[in-house]
Amino acid sequence: MFQEFKKFILRGNVVDLAVGIAIGAAFTNFANALVKDIINPLIAIIVGDRKFTTAHFTINGVDFLYGDLINAFITFLLVATVIFFLVVKPINKLSDFAFRSKTTDEPTTRKCPYCLSTIPMAATKCRFCGSTVKKDD
């Protein structure tokens, strides 16, 4: 059981996931600091409130902190934008390039002449009807 667990932990996708989470957490801290220290003061200049994070309105004695909510939303948009443009777009481009080079105009499947099911081109026996199929068919 220990060997199986060791094999699971050392698999590439688990290690990649751990690295991704660590980098994501570090970038989120950076994004939080950027929003708090740069973007909030710019919003405060526009809005005229000195502490935008504590901006609130009160209804029946209950404070609603909309400034903190807007901070979280801006941070989310910033992180999502960076992940999209620096991770998702390049990976999509790489995968398109990798799969494009493997595609050819040559068909990879054919019809079984007996049951008309789709079978691989190299098949010698139909998996659906069990008939022996010649490669020339």
Image (spheres, rainbow, N blue to C red):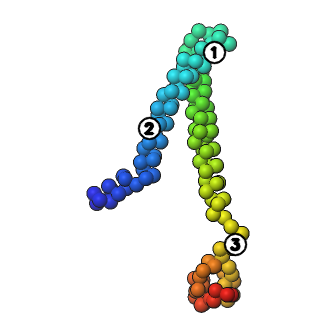
The part of the image, by quadrant, that contains residue 105 is bottom right
Q: Which residue is mark 1?
A: 42
In the picture, measured across the screen, residue 29 lies left or right of residue 116, that is left
**Residue at (61%, 40%) from the top-left corner?**
84
Q: Position of residue 73 (x, y in %)?
A: 60, 28
> Disc 3 and disc 2: Cα gap in Å?
44 Å
**Residue at (66%, 59%) from the top-left corner?**
100
Element marked by disc 3: loop
Q: Earlier in the sequence, mark 3 or mark 2?
A: 2
- Name the disc covering residue 30, or none: none
Q: Amino acid at mark 3?
A: Glu
Q: Earlier in the sequence, mark 2 or mark 1?
A: 2
Q: Is residue 129 above or below residue 25?
A: below
Element marked by disc 2: helix
Judging depth in this view, the residue of 22 and 70 nearest the camera is: 22
* Residue 115 can be seen, yes or no: no
Q: Is residue 99 above or below residue 92?
A: below
Question: Looking at this rendering, what residue extends furthest in the left direction?
Answer: 2
Mark 3 neighbour class, 10 Å CA radius: few under 14, some 14 to 19, many 20 or more: few
Q: Is residue 112 above or below residue 57?
A: below
Q: Amino acid at mark 2?
A: Ala
Q: Quadrant of the C terminus?
A: bottom right
Q: Which residue is mark 2?
A: 22
Q: Position of residue 25 (x, y in %)?
A: 47, 34
